[in-house]
Every structure is written in structure tokens, then in C-alpha cells.
Image: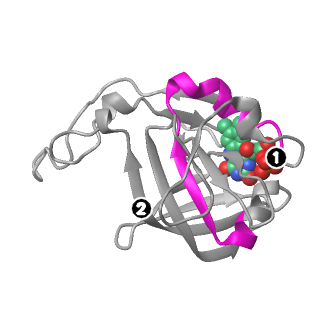
Amino acid sequence: MKKTRLDLMPVLFPTPVVLVTCKDPSSQPNIITIAWTGVVNSKPPMIGISIQPIRYSHKLIRASGEFGVNIPTREMLRVTDYCGSISGRRVNKFETTGLTAFQGEKIAAPLIEECPVNLECKVRHFLTLGMHDLFIGEILAVHADKDIVDDTGHIVPEKMDPVAFFSRPLEYWSLREKIGTYGFTQGKL
Ligand SMILES: Cc1cc2nc3c(=O)[nH]c(=O)nc-3n(C[C@H](O)[C@H](O)[C@H](O)COP(=O)(O)O)c2cc1C
């Protein structure tokens, strides 16, 4: 196959899209849409979110040292895009979207009821990278809608219906189908 050189950019597609909730002691709760996110450690469970310093949410998470990660469904695409196109400095996004806030157990920022999975995170590391700053949060509590969890306590992917993001050409995609199970080759091709 003939290859072509592309401009330098973080071409690691797709990434998840999440709604990060945050608040500091003097603020209303806020929601920011984040695509620069991923798992960075298993034990203790940790995820990273990268946020530009100009974002209102950056200030809130810096001040509070905590954030919620809420995984939206395809049905929530409009509110997901909206929370990534307007600042909490101007509007209360819980009010304008009508999303329902619920209180977790470990952090002061509320979580989003309509999202089937919600993680409560405390910031353990902070790294300045350039255009974005990386917050690495330890997951202290995981909540999931009962109807997407099987008898063994695991999330059933097809019941979750998450959104994937391609940062070029800036598109949202849904996941299609299961194509394998981890380790199914058992080391044999
Ligand atoms: C799909 C999508 C993904 C985004 N991902 C990020 C991200 O990873 N980091 C970031 O700083 N901004 C990201 N943004 C932009 C912020 O969500 C947007 O600027 C938001 O309005 C900031 O809200 P705030 O000022 O209330 O914090 C994304 C926007 C969209 C629509």
C-alpha cells in the first residue's frame, strides 16, 4: 500500500466523548464536553482529561481538585455537542439543557442522571502540555444504570450506546457491532 505523509496532529481515532462535570465551592455546577480523554492506569483506576487553560471548567477543576466523568449516549448527541460549544461563564448548562444533576458520594460536583455511566474522580496529577493541560484523576466511585449491567456486574456494551469522536474531520460516530473477544486468538493466528 502506498503511504502519504499528513500534517502533524494527534491522529489517534476514535476517542470517546464524555461530559465532564465540575464545580468549585463558589460556583454553579458546570458541564464541559471532552474528547481528549482516556484510561491511563488500571490499579488504582485512573483516567486523563486534557483541557485548555482558557476553559471555565479548567478553573473549576484546578480549584476543586475533582471532576465527574459522564458517558453520554447517541440519544444525547445534541446536548453533548451543545455543552462543547458554549461556556459555563455565560450560562448554567444544567438549566439550559434540562439535564438532571445527581449527587455522587465522593465529590462535590454533581453527576448527570441521563448518562448511563458516571465516574467520580479526584485529581492526582496535573501536567502542562502546551495548548492543553492534563488532569489525571483517580476514579473513586463508578455508577451505572441498572439496566445496562449484567448479572456479573459488568456493563453490556450494546446497551450503553456511547459516542465516538473523530477529531479530523470533526465527526461523531456510533459503534457498530462486536467483532471479537479479548484474547480469542490464544496466541495462535
Ligand atoms: C466533541 C467536542 C470535544 C471537545 N473536547 C475538548 C477537549 O478535549 N478539551 C478541551 O479543552 N475542550 C474541548 N472541547 C471544547 C469545550 O467543550 C468547549 O470550549 C466548552 O464550551 C468549554 O466549556 P466551559 O467554558 O464551560 O468550560 C470539545 C468540544 C466538543 C464539541
Residue shown at 70% from the left, 46% from the top: 32
* Relative to 149, residue 59 above or below: below
On whether ligand 1 comes within 8 Å of the CB at mark 1, the answer is yes
Query: Disc 1 designates what residue?
Result: 88
Mark 2 CB lies closer than 8 A to ligand 1: no
Does dot 2 land on a helix, a strand or a loop? strand
User: Which residue is farthest right?
Assistant: 90
Residue bearing the label numbered 2: 141
**Residue 184 placement (x, y as % from top left):** 14, 44
* Dot 1 alpha-carbon crowd within 10 angstroms: few under 14, some 14 to 19, many 20 or more: many
Horizontally, residue 108 falls left or right of residue 28, namely left
Report the span colored magenta: 61-87
Q: Quadrant of residue 132?
A: bottom right
Q: What residue is drawn where x is 55% and y is 38%?
A: 3
Locate residue 39 relative to residue 18 in the image: left or right. left
**Residue 94 placed where, x, y %?**
70, 39
Residue 45, given in percent of the width and then of the height, sits at 40, 67
49 relative to 25, above or below: above
Which amino acid, by three-letter code, is at mark 2? Ala
| Residue occupying the point 60% across, 52% down | 110
Q: Is residue 75 magenta?
A: yes
